[in-house]
Structures are given as structure tokens and as C-alpha cells.
Amino acid sequence: MYHTGTMRPAYISNGIVWRLRTALMVVVAALFLALSVQDSALAQPVDNDPATVSPVQGQVPGNTLGTDSDTEMWRAVRQGVAGQVSIPDKNAATLVQSEGELWRSIRNGPLALYASWAMLAMVVVLSLFFAIRGRIRIEHGRSEQTITRFAAFERFGHWLLASSFIILALTGLNVMYGRYVLLPVIGPEAFGALTIFGKYLHNYLAFAFMAGLVIIFVMWVSHNLPHKTDIKWVLQGGGIFSRKLHPPAKKFNAGQKVIFWLTILGGLSISMSGWTLLFPYTTHFFSGTFELVNTVFGTALPASLSPLQEQQLASLWHSIMSVFLICVIIAHIYIGTIGMEGAFDAMGSGEVDLNWAKEHHSLWVDEVMAREAEHKGPSKVQPAE
């Protein structure tokens, strides 16, 4: 049964209303979660017990050394002076490391707050885009033919990287927000068991993530170098804002190339800082980086960092870059699933509809056809099942 011309506007209107409702529900849920995280993350415990606060009128905390304190001695302790220890861990010679207070206040305060707002903003933007644009359909409809987009090993490398990153992201977010979001819901015992299990997953799957990063770099770096066709693709907005516009693209378009390089560079940065946290006090990435920056740009960054300062900077940087990459991957997951019809097939079966391929990667399709005609090998264009 066909719809008459007078019924089509109502159909379109109902579709837009449905997408707006769906997007609004997602935004409200994400906003509620972010506000709950904000209230909890900024709530820092304050100890007002006179016996444990800073020295007042010469009294030492706890009154363990009498009623008078050596001002110069405590100032030196506060500034991180190191004593002598007989145990193997020489870091224990530093009684007080004041930078730890700064690290804690940044991590539990602005870092946790701004990270939650960044992830919320990405969800809101994508929800609004979906509500307005809807799903990007195959304009000419599905054909009866498919073309091989990615071989089995390419899909293996992608899913190795993707699956490990998702688990790493969830377990990492649990470390930052779990005490505020999950602990009140599931209780301390379940939360403790879940967190320690997540810790081991995070530590060991980090190596799978790094392996996947190397695999996709080796496989796809040649396809992700800048090309003159990328300029036209960018100027036309990738065609995502128009149903009739399909800018030409090779195997990867300009948008995918941006995602690729953000993933490679961001993943490398996360891997290096994560390596520092997995093997503490064995690397000096930040000291070396700051020294290089000072040499090149004439800045005055602190190039002489203690091992503990290296760990603190690595922890903060690891969190910052992880949240940044999470935001990037959220957008990538959206466009590869509900955002575009036929896109998931590329990493699902590896076979994509020929019309989809011609609309989004026309230059790549031409290259595949020309290569097959030249070698007269078996065609990669197959009847759709």
C-alpha cells in the first residue's frame, strides 16, 4: 500500500518528533549524571580537628614533639627535603611531598568536573544532530551487490583496538567517578570487588590496546596521508548536511583521517603515560619532554622532576588524554552505527553495499574496479546475500 502525497509531510513530521524526543531523553539523562558527578567530585573532606590541623602558635600536630616546633625544620620538610632510609625504596626518605596536595585537588576537582562536562557535551551535540539530521541513508537505496571494504585481518586489528579501549575506558572512568556513581548504588563490597577486577583488566588489556594501535597504524597509515581530494570533502562538509551531496573520497575520507590520527597520536600519548603508571619510577618522559620544549621554544618548564612528580604528571595527563579520546570515539561509534546506514557493515562482515561505497568512497571504488580489470582477478563485487 502506498502513501499518498498528502500523507508524506505528516510522516516526516512524526519522524522528526520521535528523534527530538529520543535526543531529549538522552540529554536529560546525561545532564542528570553529570550534575551528580559534579556535586560529588567537588565535595572535598575538610578536617577541622585541632589536633590534626596545621601547627598553631608553635604546637606540632598531635603534640608528639612537645609544645614547640622548629620552624626551619618543618619548612624544609614541607618543601620536600629528603632524609635517609635503610629500606630499598629511597622515595620513602621524603617525608612530605607537597605537590601531592595539588595533584589531589586537581584530579578530584577541576579535572573530574571538566571531564564530565566534555563527555556530556559530546553526547548532547550528537543527540541534537541526530534529532535534526536523522540517520544518513543510502540515497539510491541498497543495491544487489556488495564490495569488500575490509579484509579479515583489518577487522581483527580494528576490533582488538576497539574492544580493549572500551574496557579500558569503562574501568578508567570507574576509578574517577565510581565512588560517586556506583558505590552508593551497589554498596562497598560489590564496588570493591568490581574495582579490583577492573584494575587487573585495565593493567593487562593495556598491552592489547597498544598492539591494536600498532596493527592499525601499519595497515592504514598509507591510506590516511593527506590528499588534495580531502580539501573538497572538507569544504562540502563531507555531505553529511545535505541528502544530495556526495563529495568524492578515497578509501578513507578527510573525516576518517582526522579520527585515525587523533586515535594514533592520542593512543600513543595514553600508552606512554600508562607505561609510566604500570612501571613507576622507571621513566622520565615529562622531564625529557620539558627539556626538549625548553630547547626549541626557549621556555622555562621544570626539566628536573623527581620520580614522584613524574608519576603525578603522568596520572593527570593519562586522565586528560583518555577523556579526550573517549569523546573522539563516542563520535566515531555514533557515525558507524545509528548515524549512517550501511556503515557498520564495513567492520561487521567486511562487505558493504555497492551503492553505499559509491556515495561515500567513489574514488576508492574506481580504484578497486580498475585494479581488478588490470589484473583480471576475481571480482570483489559480489551479489548481495
Image (spheres, rainbow, N blue to C red):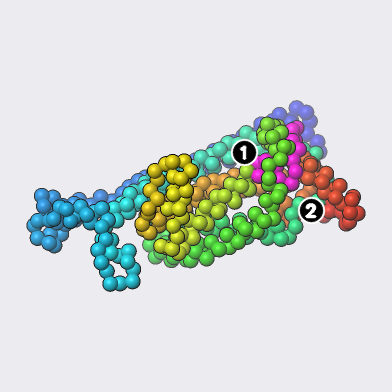
User: Is any atom of residue 29 visible in this view?
Assistant: no
Q: How many marks?
A: 2
- Say which quarter of the image contains residue 68: bottom left
**Residue segment shown in magenta:** 244-257
Inspect the image, locate mark 1, and give the three-letter code of the amino acid beneath it: Phe
Residue beneath disc 2: 148
Residue at the extreme left:
67
Q: Percent from the top left, x then y, of residue 125?
A: 56, 38
Which mark is on residue 110? none
Residue 255 part of the magenta-drawn span: yes
Left/right placement of residue 178 relative to residue 88 reads: right
Residue lying at 45% horizontally and 60% vertically, measured from the top left: 283
Residue 221 in magenta?
no
Q: Image height check: is 233 above or below 353?
A: above
Residue drawn at the location 37% of the way across and 54% of the way down? 305
Out of 118 and 252, give the one closest to the viewer: 252
Closer to the observer: label 2 or label 1? 2
Picture quarter with the N terminus? top right
Q: Quadrant of the C terminus?
A: bottom right
Q: Which mark is residue 130?
A: 1
Q: Residue at 67% across / 51% down in the picture?
A: 221
* Element type where label 2 sits in the image: strand
Classify residue 87 as left or right of residue 24: left
Q: Is residue 122 above or below residue 73?
A: above
- Mark 2: amino acid: Thr
Q: Secondary structure at mark 1?
A: helix
Whole-percent x, y for residue 207 in the image: 55, 63
